[in-house]
């Protein structure tokens, strides 16, 4: 078992909560990376995630190389497409959009990625990815042409996550989407946590320490925050060690 996944599973076993800072290559100017990462290093962040729904070719590679100059935190790819794969990262979430029924995002993109990954030194972590309705259309929904699971259908969400576990996924990612109007509810997180014996990652729409703590209390093992830091880097001050 390699270092990144081992760290996540050990934290899961010890009930230690993790925080990933999500950086979208399409929204982060390389000149801003040193200052941004310095703030992340001083915070309680445990991981750096890199990825976005729509990213220009080569941007991810350049961004990851720049981030690595300024932090020892593990850098994990959270790719929206095959073009966002770079071997300079430490690990990649090999995402299967199990909430949707578009074969491209269930297996098609994965087949395309094999040529880039089969000789890679990155950890490849199979991850069941569930898009949850949040009140507006997100980039993930638009790009993948899939519908999110509805908030009120909690049992279906939990069953979908459980199916991901039974298929051999190593992580479950509950996603409200970038810029979501509301985060994944505590009821949904709790239902998935009850049914699934895997680390649960929750992202999208979390813009405050209160919302982050609510996600943890409901059962999230890792929270992912992106837009809140993009909009206001002073948010890091609330999350300092």
Image: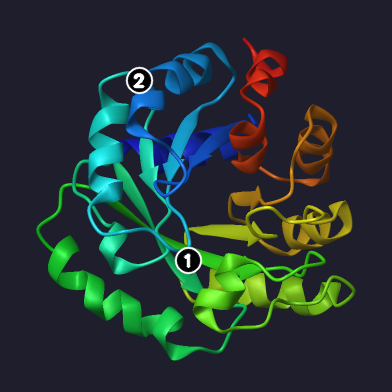
In the displayed structure, does residue 116 sit left or right of residue 161? left
Q: What element carries label 2?
A: loop
Q: Nearer the viewer, residue 106 or 16?
A: 106
In the displayed structure, does residue 51 sit left or right of residue 185? left
- At horizontal 66% and vertical 28% (from top left) the residue drawn is 232
Quadrant location of the N terminus? top left
Callout 1: 10 Å neighbours few (<14), some, many (20+)?
Answer: many
In the displayed structure, does residue 57 sit left or right of residue 241? left
Q: Nearer the viewer, residue 197 or 97?
A: 97
Q: What colour scheme was applied to this rendering of the protein?
A: rainbow
Query: Residue 96, percent across and down?
Result: 46, 72
To which quarter of the image does residue 228 belong? top right
Residue corresponding to mark 1? 169
- At horizontal 44% and vertical 16% (from top left) the residue drawn is 35
Q: Nearer the viewer, mark 1 or mark 2?
A: 2
Query: Residue 166, percent across and down?
Result: 54, 74
Query: Residue 31, percent across and down?
Result: 34, 26
- At horizontal 18% and vertical 48% (from top left) the residue drawn is 87
To which quarter of the image does residue 110 belong? bottom left
Label for residue 71?
2
- At horizontal 34% and vertical 84% (from top left) the residue drawn is 108
Instruction: Look at the picture and state if 145 lies above or below 194.
Output: below
To which quarter of the image does residue 209 belong? top right
Callout 2: 10 Å neighbours few (<14), some, many (20+)?
Answer: some
Label pair 1/2, CB-CB below 8 angstroms: no
Instruction: Look at the picture and state if 30 lies above or below 122.
Output: above
CA–CA distance in space, label 1 to label 2: 29 Å
Q: What element carries label 1?
A: loop
Query: Residue 143, percent across and down?
Result: 50, 75
**Label located before the other in sequence (1 or 2):** 2
Q: Which of 50 and 122 is in front in this view?
A: 50
């Amino acid at each position: 078992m390699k270092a990144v996944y081992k760290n996540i599973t050990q934290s899961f076993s010890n009930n230690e909560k993790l925080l990933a800072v999500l950086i979208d290559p399409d929204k982060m100017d390389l000149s801003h990376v040193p200052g941004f990462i310095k703030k992340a290093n001083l915070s309680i962040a445990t991981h750096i995630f890199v990825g976005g729904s729509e990213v220009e070719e080569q941007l991810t590679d350049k961004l990851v190389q720049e981030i690595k100059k300024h932090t020892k935190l593990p850098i994990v790819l959270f790719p929206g497409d095959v073009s966002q794969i770079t071997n300079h990262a430490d690990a990649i979430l090999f995402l299967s959009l199990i909430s949707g029924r578009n074969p491209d995002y269930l297996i098609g993109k994965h087949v395309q990625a094999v040529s880039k990954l089969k000789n890679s030194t990155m950890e490849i972590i199979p991850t069941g990815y569930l898009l949850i309705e949040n009140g507006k259309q997100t980039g993930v929904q638009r790009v993948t042409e899939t519908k999110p699971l509805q908030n009120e259908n909690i049992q279906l969400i939990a069953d979908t996550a459980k199916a991901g576990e039974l298929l051999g996924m190593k992580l479950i990612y509950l996603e409200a989407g970038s810029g979501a109007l509301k985060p994944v509810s505590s009821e949904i997180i709790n239902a998935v946590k009850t049914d699934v014996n895997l680390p649960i990652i929750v992202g999208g729409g979390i813009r405050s320490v209160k919302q982050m703590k609510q996600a943890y209390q409901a059962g999230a093992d890792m929270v992912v925050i992106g837009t809140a830091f993009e909009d206001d880097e002073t948010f890091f001050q609330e999350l300092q060690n």
